[in-house]
Image: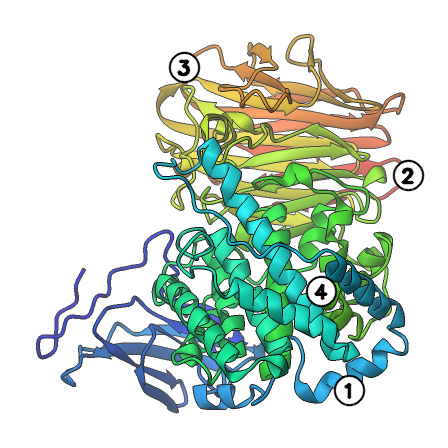
Amino acid sequence: MLTSICRGVMLDERIAEQGEWGYRPAEGAVSAVNPPSFVWRPQSGLTWQVECKSEQGSIYTVENLEFNVHCPPQMFRPGKYRWRYRGQDSKGEYTQWSKTRTFTIANEAVTMPLPVRDELLSRIPKTHPRLFLRPENIGKLVKLSKGKMKGQYNGLIEECEKILKDPPSTEEPPKYPEGTVVQSEVWYSMWWPNRKYTIKVLDSAATLGFTYILSGNEKYGLLAKRLLMECAEWDPKGSTGFVYNDEAGMPYNYYFARTYTFVNDLLTEAEKQKCRAVMKVRGEEMYNHLCPEHLWNPYNSHSNRAWHFLGEVAIAFHGEIEGADDWLWFAMNVFYNVYPVWSDDDGGWHEGINYWLGYQKRFTWWIDVMREAMGINAFDKPYYGKVGYYAMYLYPPGMAANGFGDLVFRRKAQDYRTLMSVFAAQAQNSYWQWYVDQLGGPVYGKRYIGFIRGAQLTIEAQSPDELPASRLFKGTGRAYLNTQITDAKESVQVVFKSDPFGTMSHGYEANNSFLLWGYGKRLLIRTGRRDDYGGEHHSNWMWSTRSVNNITVNGKGQRKRPATAVGEITSFKTTPEIDIVVGEAGGAYEEPLERYSRAIIFVKPELVIVYDRLVASQDSTFEYWLHAINEIAVDGQHHITVTNDDVLCNVDFLAPASLTFTQTDQYDPNPLPKVTLREWHLTAKTPNEQKQIEFVTLYRVHRKGQRIGTVAELEKVEGGYVLKASTADGSVTALLPFDDSATMLQAEELQTKGKIAVRFERDGMDAKTVIEN
């Protein structure tokens, strides 16, 4: 609603909607950062005042804020606080104060104040270079190039000599033919190739310019200058303009800025003015697209790299382009108040690990730039204290094509070696260094970026043996359950998703889905292959609940890609013997369910129990979907086998009874003819319509010829089920309640009220009992 007004100025205090950043600190929040970031709903025509009061009575007040975000330049005492805000219009009239929100700053909160604007700008070198290195640090790098980094330096020289012999073309890329339809074949044939073309010429220029600084070899600098000035002739709003084609416009802007700062001493004043004129147009185009929209609506994939590329341009042209300092102040407010967006402090990433890799790789450039230009350490952010665990737990050494999110089929553990090398060195995390060492040791990237990072501190590796083998990333609704994280080929892994970000953007898979790996082999998988972004196969199969290991109701699944199709991991518990994770996703469906709770119980290493509780709004049929790379053998509902080479998974649908099965290797719809991939899709359908149902399904993962348990008994009792199952070396008892009522479930020494309880008796060892938290 619109709050009542003071002197005619209305304050818009509508609650934040899904997809908006929201009011922060939220009511009752505990801030892991000191000071906290304040965020509120934007409103045009107003500047802002924020007031924050501690329990002890101390007050922090700031006014004349231009943005709807604010990170104070000072620490607060840990403890409880209340905050509010109000607006002021151009006539000096105030709105009434907003509602008051309370929050707490934790004792262990990390210190990360945002310096005031003038101080921040004063840290930038007055002369060039300004990106990735400072003028006063050139001597150190030159010394390293002649010493311990001579090999890397020689690689730079070799690269520059190749560019000298065959310089890239600087002819401006063409625009799309008139009438070209976005995402048509003609459009695709130019959209990405124009990006690659732009990168080739301007990254070559930046490499030449950086190597010129180290070597003093003017021929490198002069070629860099020529490439720079010829690209400066391109139409700033043409084929490489940010709005016209952001995938070409973004690299143009940051590679141009890097080259400009690297060869600045070779440019005449007229050439500098030409570069400034070009980048004023290009920078303003980015700034106007991003600011202030991104501060409240930050869930745009491309914008989440564009803002820090704009920051690079701003630093390179600080004091030289009118408005450049505004661009930088905006970028720093994004970093402190609205980043990262696809995660929380756990270190996960909603869009999946392929996009995590691409976006974090580019963001580490900004990490380097902020550190050198302004002395800001990104690893003070709680997220960056945990960021490396995301790859380490999802992709143990030897893993490939794993996880949820767009385009993950491309990836293997080795792909994270360079990024994790950077994270390990800069965060000084010995576990991440161990992971890097398992992948072959540190590598820091190519060309000048790799050289700069090679000069940074290293850290001694530490084995993760003392860490738990499973990990929860609650903020992005991911749980990675492993028997161990040192070698995927000797491990069983369950990946589970129930995501509070919903199914938006590239993290589109349905909530309460799971994946199953065994001994380095994919068993139960996510399916499809992106052939055309947003095309028929991508949007109607891969975005569909039918494409993952999940459940549809009356043939309908969860809503496709809205922020409102949310899930939540409501319980997680890990021990060396047993893991339990529970997710809730009933509200995510096209026709919302009253309940859809999926619990996964992992008795390591052999037995996975999946317990599903669904309550529909009316009598319904339910379809349980499983997917594999090979045809699934079905001999009734208790004898189903998934096979991948020498690794098998035996599947037993203990409940409900009388399921009917269909199987196909066709998608609905199939991808374009260029994609020949086919995978197998098994559907188990309930025989009758009913409002409430429970599925109890056992999965036994093993190598061919390996001894496993074969006994499984399920008894329905008042209030739930009692499951008893054998394993290769023991027995498992699980109590599975129907609901959260007070009905007591009991089996021998095990009992529970409304919570899942599991007891594992391994031969010759004390029994282990785990109860859902």
Provide the residue designation for mark 4. Answer: 423
Judge whether 93 appears above or below 461 on screen. Answer: below
Task: State the image quarter where residue 483 is shown.
Answer: top right
Looking at the image, tell me whether mark 4 or mark 1 is earlier in sequence order.
Answer: 1
Looking at the image, tell me whether mark 2 or mark 3 is earlier in sequence order.
Answer: 3
Which label number is shown at residue 689?
3
- Residue type pointed to by label 2: Gly
Which label number is shown at residue 764?
2
CA distance separating discs 4 and 3: 52 Å
Residue density around tag 3, few if under 14, some if 14–19, many if 20 or more, within 10 Å = few
Residue density around tag 1, few if under 14, some if 14–19, many if 20 or more, within 10 Å = few
Provide the residue designation for mark 1. Answer: 139
**Disc 2 vs disc 4: which is toward the camera?**
4
Q: Is 435 left or right of 265, judged from the image as shown? A: right
Looking at the image, tell me whether mark 2 or mark 4 is earlier in sequence order.
Answer: 4
- Residue type pointed to by label 1: Gly
